[in-house]
Image: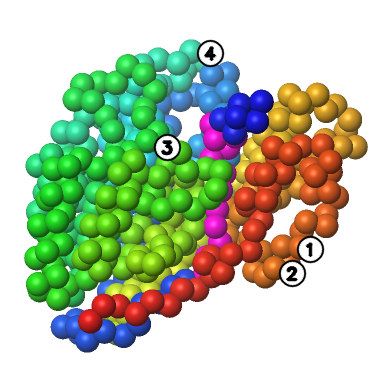
Amino acid sequence: MKKRWYVSLLIGSLLIVLSLGGFLFKEKETKMTKEATYWVLSDNHYIDKSLYDEGSEFQRIQTTAAGKELLYQKESLKALVDAAIQKQPKGIIMTGDITLNGERKSAEELAKLLKPLEENGIECWVIPGNHDINDGWARSFQGDKAYKTEQISPKDFERLFDMSYQNAKDRDPHSLSYLIDASDNTQFLLLDTAIYGKANGTTNPQTKGRLKEETLAWMTTHLDKAKKEGKETLVFMHHNLLQHNPLIYEGFVLENSQELETLLTNYSVPLVFSGHTHAQGIKKSEPSGLVEVVSSSFSITEQSYGEIRISPENISYKKKSLNVDEWAKNNGLIDDNLLNYQAYTKKLFVEDGQKMAYGQLIESGIYDESILDPIAYFVGEMNWRYFTGNTPKSLAEEESLKKEEGYQLLKEYSPGLLDYADSIIRFDSDKLTIDIPLND
């Protein structure tokens, strides 16, 4: 029963976020003469408006979207592009699951939405996630029916996001991985960790990920060259390198993560970015000191992205949130959901967590509303806190949360949900600012 609950939790929620402030890499002598800023985001799960109507089938998809917002994605991405044009980062990195389920039409329209970045001198680098290439779930939704729609092949991906590959210093011939010279002293390895076939998919996409041996060999060549040239390497990929949560890691941590971590450690790579779990988090691997940042899903509440700053003195990272409400107001929009987008997306997310809790409790035979309601409210709020980075900032705050009625009822009535709650409300100093010296 407990194993069934975990499987249901993984499929139904994907709801974890480790809170973060920023983190700073100490001074190192470099050739760089000025600061460069980059933005990183993940799991925007874009589905184009042309692929659905207001029918019952798409309404059903919305209720099973694990708190993702699907109706206003074009607007939120336009807000992101407009913010970037105003603030002028040097580049934006998107670490996979750029489409809902690999619909070619979604990728085509997303590429158009991102085009103004290039026109305004901002580079955009995209890598696929497990939902993007040859996904057998690619569908359009009309009325009460779902219809198969064209999928994205590897060649389609390379063609549609040619702005990524045209600016690459080198390409891995065995995957969609590539190398970017980011600055005088820094290079980015953007890695394709998804598992997909050579032809259109006929089933659900693989959740798990793996780097090909040929890709690891290609990486080794570039890591070795960078080391000789005195360059730092930052790595971007979809699947996680490290285990960030004791309950949710199977299918999310890279299958050959140990092999990759050993390689990166041997070449003193300080920092890895990933996504996939929709779980914002920072974790430091001991004893290597390698740090991984997992970016939250851009399609859920707070619309988070990360700001990376590379200067002659340091590399820093800080989580940011996009203000879609203000963008909607400034653009004269009248839709209340857009004008109150943060509240709207928070409501979607909290209610999804509550629904998950209600379902698990009822399945275990609990029907008393005086038990159901406090637990569901507590789990919904803890999910929101966890995903948006508002987890306990101290042991005292953690203990205070555990005194709430919902948590006390969990202790009495639901060991499974209690395990989940304990995994998302723990104070952990690694969630806060991390300060790591760069290698000489």
Q: Earlier in the sequence, mark 3 or mark 4?
A: 4
Residue picked out by circle 1: 400
Q: Could you tell me which secondary element the residue under label 4 belongs to?
A: loop
At label 3, which amino acid type do we have?
Gly
- Alpha-carbon distance for marks 4 and 2? 50 Å
Residue 385, position as x, y percentages in the image: 64, 55
Q: Are marks 2 and 1 in contact (CB under 8 Å)?
A: yes
In the rendered structure, the answer to whether residue 16 lies left or right of residue 416 reads left
Residue 113, position as x, y percentages in the image: 32, 46
Give 192 or 428, whichever is nearer the viewer. Answer: 428
At label 4, which amino acid type do we have?
Asp
Residue at horizontal 27 percent and vertical 63 percent from the top = 265
- Alpha-carbon distance for marks 3 and 2? 33 Å
Give 352 or 229, whichever is nearer the viewer. Answer: 229
Q: Could you tell me which secondary element the residue under label 1 belongs to?
A: helix
- The picture quadrant where one finds residue 50 is top left
Estimate how packed mark 2 is, as few (under 14), some (14 to 19) or many (20 or more) residues with alpha carbons within 10 Å: few
At label 1, which amino acid type do we have?
Ser
SS majority, magenta: loop
Disc number placed over residue 251 in the picture, else none: 3
Disc number placed over residue 384 in the picture, else none: none
Residue picked out by circle 2: 396
Residue range corresponding to the magenta coloring: 9-21
Q: Quadrant of the N terminus?
A: top right
Residue picked out by circle 4: 144
Residue at horizontal 53 percent and vertical 13 percent from the top = 144
Residue at horizontal 76 percent and vertical 47 percent from the top = 378
Please say if 393 is above or below 345: below
Residue 241 visible in the snapshot: yes
- Alpha-carbon distance for marks 4 and 1? 47 Å
- Alpha-carbon distance for marks 2 and 1? 6 Å
At label 2, which amino acid type do we have?
Ala
